[in-house]
Amino acid sequence: LVLLVPRRTQVLEQVLGCFALSLPRSPVCEGWPVQPDLNLDCHALADRIILSGLPGDVDEGELMSFFTKHGATGVALARSRIAVFASIAFPSSGEIVKFVGRGVHTFSDDQDTRLARLLPSNRACGSSKTSLPGLPAPVLSPGEHAGVLMLRWSPIVLAMGYIVELRPAGIQAEWSVVDALSGGFSKHSSSCRVSGLPSNIAFEARITYSATCGCSSDASDASTWCVAHPSPTPAPGYWPQVLPVAPTHQHLALAPE
């Protein structure tokens, strides 16, 4: 899941506003009951607004029918395992400042005129509730020695810090936080080295980040499984060769030169 991508450093570096949006919905069809209002957590950045708390039946057209009236140029939806997020793009920060600066916004369709309201955030920033989209799955690879794993992830300038978690793969074990010597991984981090692991167990990793307002992201998807043991290096004078076996299989062996 990716809604926030590395771009110009000045664009996504700070959260300009953290608020809730109460957005009325139209009936699914004429004559049908009115749907409950959307109550969304919002983060205003320099060129977009990130929405969380969306129900699964919301689509891009419904959101754009409201946000285009306030200068939005596009919307992207993303669904994680536990949440739905949207990214509303604007040409510049001017439209976002104007939108955030007003507590009430009117908009109309063929049937009615409605009021959308900006409210204090649905929960205090820094709470355990996630309200930002997660990063792509990190890349886990063997280290240079047994018991060592290397982890790399895609950094974003919105992040002020990262939390790395590791667990044995395939058994639904509890996630364990990887502690950095400095007490956490800074916004400038994009990789780490984990040592002291058993070399006969496969592990998987995931990562989350926090923003300047203290809100946390959804956890990334888990990485592919990896054993903390270096890949064997062929001895000098040996080269890979495919040996003929059953018609539907191939077997890779090392044969002397």
Image: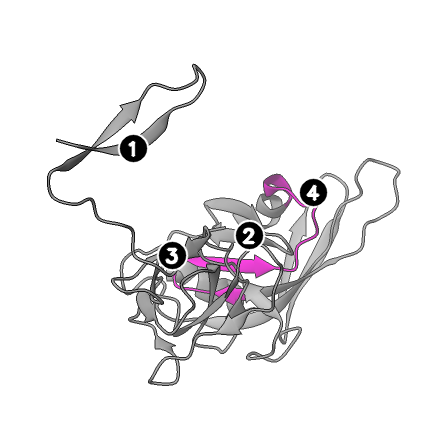
The residue to which callout 1 is attached is 253
- Badge 4 amino acid: Asp
In this picture, which residue range is highlighted in magenta? 43-62
- Badge 2 amino acid: Ala
* Distance from the alpha carbon under mark 3 to that under mark 4: 50 Å
The residue to which callout 4 is attached is 109
* Distance from the alpha carbon under mark 3 to that under mark 1: 25 Å
**Which of disc 2 and disc 3 is earlier in sequence?**
2
The residue to which callout 2 is attached is 86
**Which of disc 2 and disc 4 is earlier in sequence?**
2
Under tag 2, what secondary structure?
strand
Under tag 1, what secondary structure?
strand
In this rendering, which labeled residue sits more in front, label 3 or label 2? 3
* Distance from the alpha carbon under mark 3 to that under mark 2: 28 Å
* Distance from the alpha carbon under mark 4 to that under mark 2: 22 Å
Pointer 4 local density, CA inside 10 Å: few below 14, some 14–19, many at least 20:
few
- Badge 1 amino acid: Ala
- Residue that appears at 45% across and 45% down: 73
**Which of disc 4 and disc 3 is earlier in sequence?**
4
Under tag 4, what secondary structure?
loop
Q: In the current view of this chain or complex, which residue is farthest to the bottom?
A: 182
Q: Up-down: is 40 above or below 68? A: below
Give residue 62's position: percent from left, percent from top.
Answer: 64, 43
- Badge 3 amino acid: Leu
**Which of disc 1 and disc 4 is earlier in sequence?**
4
* Distance from the alpha carbon under mark 1 to that under mark 2: 49 Å
- Residue that appears at 39% across and 19% down: 245
Could you say which disc has been placed on residue 140 in the image? 3
